[in-house]
Image (tube, rainbow, N blue to C red):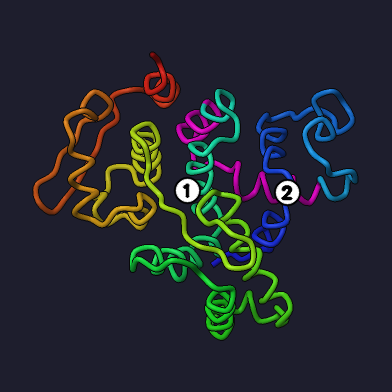
Amino acid sequence: MIINTDINILGGLPDINLINVFLEDTPAPLDSAGGHRSFTSIRTDRAVKRFESAIIGTILHYKNDEVKSMLTTCLRSEGITADSLHLLFLNSSRNNDLLHYLNKSVFFPALYSGRIGIKTEEVTACLNDLKSREPALQSWSDTTIKTTASKYLTLLKKFNLLEGSKNKSIKRIFLNDKVFVLYIYWLVAIEGAANLMKSDWLEYFYLDRDLFLERVMQKKYSKYYNLYYNGEQLRIEPIKSYQQIYHELTKS
């Protein structure tokens, strides 16, 4: 497991729109008309550099050109929205091992068991348990552990998955058709020709396995992908290109 402090940094991000500033390969200079001061209240270049490193390393890193093309098309077209935040959370979880671990160990168990909220103490306990087994966490102090636990929940709130201030509750999460298909394309780009029923990423569809199968096989999606399922193995082949799929889903 590769562990860094990106969760702490991103949890403290004062303006989520800073993500768009670093979307391009050659972002505008910090003081220019298109620089960060036009979009955020962050005033020091040093702070921006910290956020830039975390944003590019966790949020805007792409496994391949297909994922990059699809996500950047979405962000350039609609900016930071509820829909694009779903995609950014998914992609960030793939890029950040600790974020993915906490999702699978804390967030998803709470979500799928029907719980209302998540307490910071639960995340702290999870991190302390991981620390006992993970060399990369051995140097983390109790303060760092507690801060990371708090920032993790704050980051989930920024991704529009939790709400509330001190006591954070889980929002009702449902992927609309556009986001669902984009998730499918992301999944195929990540997993390739593997049996998708064994994918570690199905939990991110916010459906149990039976409901996921029921939805993914709906006829209305057949114009976007070909599906092969024999009762055990699931394979999906995109019909549209990764450059086209966002526009196909949003055209009137």
Q: Nearer the viewer, residue 114 or 16?
A: 114
- In the rendered image, residue 3, in percent from the top left (x then y), is placed at 61, 66
Give the left or right position of residue 103, taking residue 156 as reference. Answer: left
Question: Which amino acid type is marked by label 1?
Answer: Leu
The part of the image, by quadrant, that contains residue 104 is bottom left
- In the rendered image, residue 189, in percent from the top left (x then y), is placed at 39, 39
Q: Secondary structure at mark 1?
A: helix
| Residue at the image point whose x is 41% and y is 50% from the top | 173
Vertical arrangement, residue 123 with respect to residue 7, above or below: below
| Residue at the image point whose x is 39% and y is 24% from the top | 245
| Range shown magenta | 49-73
Vertical arrangement, residue 92 with respect to residue 246, above or below: below
Give the class, few, some or many, for how many residues have Cα within 10 Å of label 1's Cα (few <14, many ≥20). many
Question: Is 103 colored magenta in this rendering?
Answer: no
Quadrant that contains the N terminus: bottom right
Q: Residue furthest bottom?
A: 132
Give the left or right position of residue 165, taking residue 90 as reference. Answer: right
Vertical arrangement, residue 172 with respect to residue 219, above or below: below
Label 2, on which residue? 53
What is the C-alpha distance between the residues marked 1 and 2? 19 Å
Q: Secondary structure at mark 2?
A: helix
Label 1, on which residue? 90
